[in-house]
Image (cartoon, helix red, strand yellow):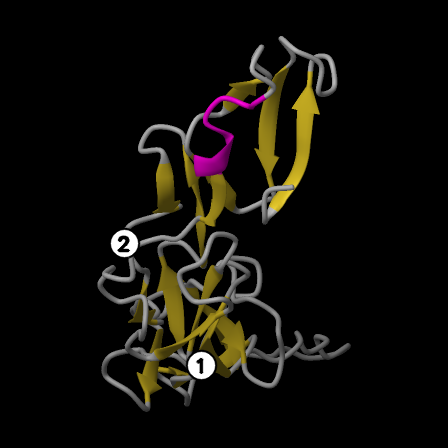
Amino acid sequence: RISNSKAILCSNHNIKGSVCKIQCNDNFRLVGPRNFTCQESGKWTKYDINYCEQITCSRHIAGFSSISNGNVNVNNGNLAGSVYRFSCDEGYRLVGQANIKCQWSDKYQDGRWSHDQAPSCVKITCDSPSRSNPNRIDYTCDSLGHNYKTQCTYKCTNPKNYALIGPEKIYCGKNQKSEGIYKVLNSNMPLTIRNLPKCELITCPPLPKPKYGSMTCDAD
């Protein structure tokens, strides 16, 4: 039996004229003729030069060994079946393939990486916070770049006459795709048009008119 082979399939056992085919183990490839025949001489054709060789991939792919602002885990180096797994540090998101595998390529008849370019980790950022009415509401943030975990506080431009309705504090978080979105502070609730804070005019409930008199106010 040939080392690292799973089976030798023959058309008629070891009888003259029988044609046999070698099947290598997973992640191995055959070196030498795939088929050999039992000849009239009682010998197999070219049987002694066949062997199963482990499939490998090139090690020279830029970025596979390390990634800025992230981590790389790999098993079995550059052998077939090996997988490079990439992940990013907190505050960064992965751009590209998270897993890259060494596998057999029919086109090249050799081992090839499933992708030839390593991913990168980019900083998670949010856009400027939305405002329901820029003339009445404003905000301040503790980071100019609106980076991940940046906190922002809403306030009314005229707090004497207007009251803030809705969340006062928000922060730059992330969604399931690791894209930057604003969320309500101390909550996982995304900031949307439905819960966007707004400033409303401070009013009092109407006063009842006196029964035997009149009443005037200095404003509507």
Residue found 51% across the figure and 30% down from its top: 47
**Residue 187, how many percent across, how many down?**
62, 79
Residue drawn at the location 44% of the way across and 26% of the way down: 33
Viewer can see residue 131:
no
Q: How many C-alpha atoms fall within 10 Å of the one at disc 2: few (<14), some, or many (≥20)? A: some
* Residue drawn where x is 32% and y is 86% of the image: 140
What's under tag 2, amino acid-wise?
A: Gln
Q: Secondary structure at mark 1?
A: loop
- Observer-nearest of 15 and 207: 15
Instruction: For the residues labelled 2 and 1, say whether their Cβ atoms are less than 8 Å apart.
Output: no
In the image, is residue 193 part of the stretch drawn in magenta? no
How far, Cα to Cα, is label 2 from label 1? 22 Å
Relative to 75, residue 14 above or below: above
* Residue appearing at x 29%, y 50% in the figure: 116
- Which residue is identified by label 1? 90
Camera-nearest residue between 38 and 101: 38
Residue 59 picture location, percent across and down: 29, 62
Q: Nearer the viewer, residue 214 or 207?
A: 207
User: Which element carries disc 2, helix, strand or loop?
Assistant: loop
Q: Position of residue 111 (x, y in %)?
A: 38, 45
Going by the image, does 31 lie left or right of 41? left
Residue on which the image places disc 2: 117
Extent of the magenta region: 43-50
Q: Amino acid at mark 1?
A: Glu
